[in-house]
Amino acid sequence: MNDYERKHSEILRRFGAECTVLLKSDGTFPLKAPCELALYGSGARRTIKGGTGSGEVNSRYFATTEDGLKNAGFTVTSKDWIDRYDDIYKEAKKRFISNLKRSALKRGTLAILSDMGAVMPEPEYELPTDAEGDVAVYVLSRISGEGSDRRPIPGDILLTETEKRDILALNQKYKKFLLVLNVGGVVDISPVMEVGNILLLSQLGAETGNILADLILGKSAPSGKLTATWSEWKDHPDIGGFGDKHDTYYNEGIYVGYRYFDSAYKKPLFPFGYGLGYTEFSVNADEVSEKDSKVSVNVSVKNIGDRNGKEVAQLYVSQPQGRLGKPYQALVAFEKTEELKPGEEQRISLTFDLRDLASYDTKRAVWILEPGDYVLRQGTSSRDTKPAAVIRLNGEALIKQCKNCFGKPEISEWKPDRRQGEIPDDVPVIEIDAGAFKTEIVDYNLSYDIDPLVENFSDEELCLMNIGAFKRKGSMSVIGEAGQSVAGAAGETVCCLREKGVPAMVMADGPAGLRLSRQYIQDEKGVHSLGKSMPESVMELMPAPAAFGMKLFAGEKKVKGDILEQNCSAIPIGTALAQSWNLDFAKLCGDIVGDEMEHFGVHLWLAPALNIHRDIRCGRNFEYYSEDPLISGLFAAAVTRGVQKHPRCGTTLKHFAANNQETNRYGSNSVVSERALREIYLRGFEIAVKESQPHALMTSYNLLNGVHTSERRDLTEDVLRAEFGFKGIVMTDWIIGAMYMGPKKYPAPNAPRTAAAGGDLFMPGGKGDLKAMLKGLEKGIVTRRQLMINATRVLHMAKRLKGNGGQYESE
């Protein structure tokens, strides 16, 4: 291993336990020493480090559960069971892929186009769990990924009969039994809730197995908290549409995740913000203050148990219901303590701005604070809060005057019975005058300078500046691997204008770390990936001739010259990272990625992804942080600050916006109200932009209220740039014509329309995109001035990240 790999692995292992959530504990863990251990479950050897698709990272090694336990000195007694399960899984997977390909052909398509990301449900089987041991561990794994959504069937969201039988039998047989959830999203574990020890390990990247072993032996302690509500499937909200082929209606409005469960009186299995540890804490609020709309609640956290640990203090607010209606409560601040020894105490301050509590009044296009009592609730989960203070507003405060941007979709939104909860008489009350708030008025009349270099470009050169780099001759670019300078990079900006002073930027995918080719060769024509440079989940769905051709394209047939390596660090998936509730660790993970970007010559990382966990069935939830926009925005900002502390590196926030399902992801239309969009689905992006000013942002595949997000000038210019103050470049997701084959309700996104909307880059770029852009310019779909504005932004960012100056400045 290289020095950077060792350094990064040590950091990830040291902090990884903070991402794990102890759901249940009977006190029998951690263990005092390694022993004989019976290991079972789908994740015993086939442990999942992260999801499929763009989330796959090619790291040098990966410690499975079996590896980690053996490394720690355990004797795994169930090798025969694990070997036999392996054989069963391989056969089931072979049949599954074969059936997908056959079914696709019958429908007149290819599995690679229709079934990308499809996940095989866990198979049923009969294997005796008769290995001896002092302790038993059952690792239940689930995987999901880009291109397909999850389903409420056994082996996916639900448990199989085999899993229920074996887990309950082991729980009866062993005094010390641990159920480990190696999953990227919610699983309905209600049938096995009698188990005394349940750990949500999640998917922690390359060190997953070693982190688990450390936890079992007490070398580290779980201190994570849930960032999504875990419930029985029967209690999962069904008030909004999901997975509809063409139009998905967000009928739930602002009541997403715990905002729904808390407002609808629904009791989950485990609430948002919940998590146990190996010790216990007392958490109490005392002093509350307000100055210039900033509210601070001082909290004392004391370790009252007998082991070291960390706790997360959380602050929620119940707003006056008023005319608009509000969720029962919403998270407004949180902070994680340092590691506290038994008896040790730490005082922390939870602070938020009252202006950030404003609700969007669509009728007047204004953010408002309604008059009444704002109840501050301090606790350690959304279901464990108590009133700490009341902020009493004596009138309506107008916070920000905007304009409505997203039309008037025909949508009927669910509304709960209104409640705010009881307020004890002894809770302090702070009176606030509504007149103290000044109204911000958004100026939508943006003006842009045009670089003199750009003004002298020909029409074709301007069009090339507005699309990704592509090969003029030879093979077409491969989606997700269109880069020409770094092997396995996702794409680049225009390369053919270097002599005119335009440097190219290299982009790499992978929200759980950089996704690059592990092996490559370099010659006079550039770099060439070797081996399985594309994600395994993509390669296995390709028709045999295409897969063979890909191998030839990758240089597997004949290798000349030295084989070079690129080994990247796989960090925890987005959900796991957010479960740490540790923004410093998130920044560290960004720093790890930024360090490797510098090492390999990558300028823009196509991450972080911060879409909302609207529905547990979304196949890409594992990439995303939370069902809560505050968590989502703050973690994206922390990761961005970590990456961009490296001067030549930048992040790309994605997917903007309302990208909450994978079903028909290229042609799905999200139908959302203006208020829900602004308060839930855009809010995290706003926080991330204002807190960290990322260098780039990626629009989403889906349509928003009937228009592709990349073609919505109101989204890109009015909201992102005018309201949020974004100063970077905007690119599309990777759009290839083959994605839009077959009948569609809505037309495919178009390069000139995207450019006209203020989108700077149509990615990954191709000959057809150049032709379309030139034709759009000729027909007046996009103006030359708009192309120059976009090109100026790209030029300045490229110069900044390549070290050649540039006028863009990060805040």
Image: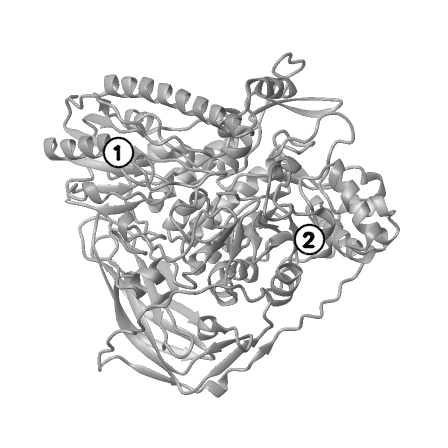
- Residue 535 visible in the snapshot: no
Image position of 246 with respect to 298: above or below: above
* Left or right: 328, with 403 as reference point: left
Image position of 161 with respect to 762: above or below: above
Verify CB contact (< 8 Å) between mark 1 and mark 2. Answer: no
- Residue 196 visible in the snapshot: yes
Mark 2 surroundings: few (<14), some (14-19) or many (≥20) residues within 10 A: many
Image position of 275 with respect to 284: above or below: above
- The residue carrying mark 1 is 160
- The residue carrying mark 2 is 759
Label 1 secondary element: loop
What is the quadrant of the C terminus in the image?
bottom right
Return the x and y of residue 106 as percentages of the image width and height: 51, 26
The amino acid type found where label 1 is placed reads Thr
Label 2 secondary element: loop
Return the x and y of residue 323 as percentages of the image width and height: 41, 79
Residue 181: image tag: none
* Left or right: 32, with 524 as reference point: left
Mark 1 surroundings: few (<14), some (14-19) or many (≥20) residues within 10 A: some
Q: 715 or 183, which is in the foreground?
A: 715
Total residue callouts:
2
Give me the residue at 57% from left, 46% from top.
Answer: 667
Return the x and y of residue 329 as percentages of the image width and height: 34, 68
Return the x and y of residue 742 as percentages of the image width and height: 60, 37
Q: Closer to the observer: label 1 or label 2? A: 1
Precedes in sequence: disc 1 or disc 2: 1
Residue 809 falls in which quadrant of the image? bottom right
Residue 183 falls in which quadrant of the image? top left
Give me the residue at 18% from left, 32% from top.
Answer: 165
The amino acid type found where label 2 is placed reads Gly
* Left or right: 339, with 662 as reference point: left
